[in-house]
Amino acid sequence: MGLVYAFRNEIEQIQDERLREFLVESLDCIPEFYETMNSFIEETQRAFKYAMILAEEMDSSDVVLDIIGISALLQDCTKYDYLNDGQGNWYTEENLVHPLTVRTTLAPMQGIIGRDMFDDIMRVIEGSHGFNSPIPQVMPEYNSPAQLWILPFANRLAKEVT
């Protein structure tokens, strides 16, 4: 429940009850070591804040706001792997294709919101790196809906503005 508690203010902003349940259940399955990564939590909170501001400025519907907010909170839930070096020392290593591994990690939660809504959230997450995506096939295209560009912009702001 550590990340659920850390993101409690953000969770409260998700309006749809089923989507909020999906978010809470998804956050609950993230490995516990994330709870100790303050920089991860703070950057995720900033990305959420900027994503919501951008989405609201675009007059996004309530469901789109929820999708973008959830995507901001879950986009990095597989960003790090906790590994053992074989000598008993544990360390974190970044998973460079983490926007794609979120789908398989959260697939057991799909039943809470249904396949279509799950796919909508995953599409936003998979495109969350924008032009910096390590996987060009999931990068939003120039003619993609503007909402697919919100998270890449919000992530950039979250990294640069504290």
Image (spheres, rainbow, N blue to C red):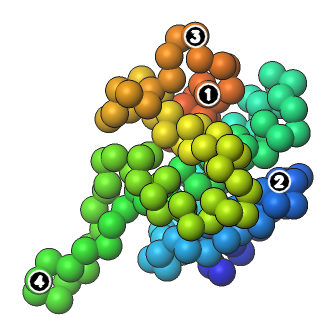
Q: Nearer the viewer, residue 47 or 75?
A: 75
Q: Residue at x 77, y 66 (%)?
A: 21
Whole-percent x, y for residue 36 in the image: 49, 75
Question: Secondary structure under badge 4?
Answer: loop
Name which residue type carries label 3.
Answer: Asn
- Which residue corresponds to mark 2? 14
| Label 2: few (<14), some (14–19) or many (≥20) C-alpha neighbours in 10 Å | many
Dot label at residue 143: 3
Q: CA distance from mark 2 to mark 4?
A: 42 Å
- Which residue corresponds to mark 4? 86
Q: CA distance from mark 3 to mark 2?
A: 27 Å
Q: CA distance from mark 1 to mark 3?
A: 10 Å
| Label 4: few (<14), some (14–19) or many (≥20) C-alpha neighbours in 10 Å | few
Q: Residue at x 17, y 89 (%)?
A: 88
- Which residue corresponds to mark 1? 148
- Decide which of tag 4 and tag 1 comes sooner along the chain: 4
